[in-house]
Image: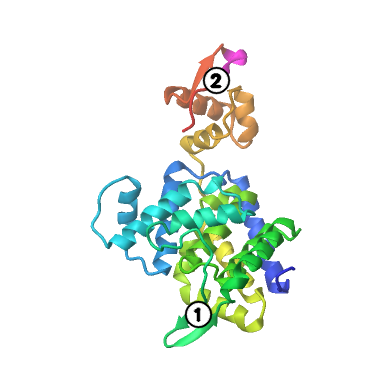
Amino acid sequence: MKPPYQITPEILKLVSSVSEKLGQINAKFLDKPSPKLRKENRIKTIHSSLSIEGNTLTEAQITALIENKRIIGPEKDVNEVINAISVYQQLASFDPTSSTSFLKAHELLMKGLVSENGKYRKKGVGIMAGDQIAHMAPPAENVPHLMKELFHYLKESNEIALIKSCVFHYEMEFIHPFIDGNGRMGRLWQTLILMKEFSVFEFIPFENMIHQTQRAYYHALSQSDKSGNSTPFIAYMLKVLDDSLHHMLDFKSRILTTTDRLSYFSERNPTEFSRKDYMQVFKEISSATASRDLKKGVEMGLFAKEGDKTKTIYRMIKAL
């Protein structure tokens, strides 16, 4: 059964805006950011998603843990970060339409934090707001069936990924399938759904925008609960995605450097190519600029040069 929601004019406008920005990102060769930017964004993602849940570690401390350095901090917070690092490092290996992958991700994310990691809850839960119950989750015995239906929607619906990712995020939070870790799993799985359709979402820390608008995040969840459909939450999350993409594009005048181009090109993993092939990717550069780029690539040990003049061929050695 399809989860209830409506496609409003606001949602259509946001989908159009997000789609336009995704096109700009591809046109500017930003769909595969530099390794340094990827690392920085991954740190922001982990920091923001866990901060929403009360984790106290700083971005500097998370960086240290990624680099296998020792830090001083609450044991629970350190374990949360170590688990999140592990999960995000292997995110691409999970199947967003598989409940088995979903449970495996929860098992890794909550390892050593709850005894029921990787398992749906066996008892009822209520979400508290102060001393009042803000949301009473469905009975535990209904969880497996509800999650099965949700994954069926995710796999079989012809709805666009932007919408499906938001619907899954809200519906999963409503079902509240785990004793703990539901919030971080909702955000993690939305990232996975999106990145399978648009690779750039692996490197966009939209959790940072949720962290900055945390009150609006919980308000959107509450409004969807009250209205009985995910429409308010879809509108909120699309705005978050739109703002996150805008932030990434917020250097429109930025000119790609030689290193930027080489990094992007090397990740395409061509085994053999010519200067002409290189210029087919970067159509705006001159032949002289392409020659300088390729010369630097040889000097950096990215590829080897064979032949001379018009017969020159480059063979890939490693990615930048």
Asked if the residue under mark 2 is in contact with the one under mark 1, i.e. CB atoms within 8 Å, the reply is no
Return the mark for residue 291.
Answer: none
Q: Find the magenta span and give its range.
A: 309-315
Q: What residue is pinned by disc 2?
A: 315
Left or right for 122, reference 86? right
Q: Which element carries disc 2, helix, strand or loop?
A: strand
Counting from the top left corner in percent of width and height, residue 60 is at: 31, 55
Q: Can the viewer see residue 251 in this picture?
A: no
Q: Can the viewer see residue 121 in this picture?
A: yes
Q: Amino acid at mark 1?
A: Gly
Image quadrant where one finds the N terminus:
bottom right
Q: Which element carries disc 1, helix, strand or loop?
A: strand
**Earlier along the polypeptide chain: callout 1 or callout 2?**
1
Per the image, is 112 magenta? Answer: no
Give the alpha-carbon distance from disc 1 to disc 2, as whole Å.
59 Å
Q: Is residue 225 above or below residue 20?
A: below
Counting from the top left corner in percent of width and height, residue 5 is at: 71, 73
- Residue sitting at 46 percent across and 33 percent down? 320
State the residue lying farthest toward the bottom: 132
Q: What residue is pinned by disc 1?
A: 126
- Residue sitting at 65 percent across and 68 percent down? 146
Left or right for 36, reference 23? left
Query: How many numbered markers are drawn?
Result: 2
Q: Amino acid at mark 2?
A: Arg
| Circle 2 crowding by C-alpha within 10 Å: few under 14, some 14–19, many from 20 | some
- Residue sitting at 34 percent across and 51 percent down? 63
Counting from the top left corner in percent of width and height, residue 265 is at: 55, 33
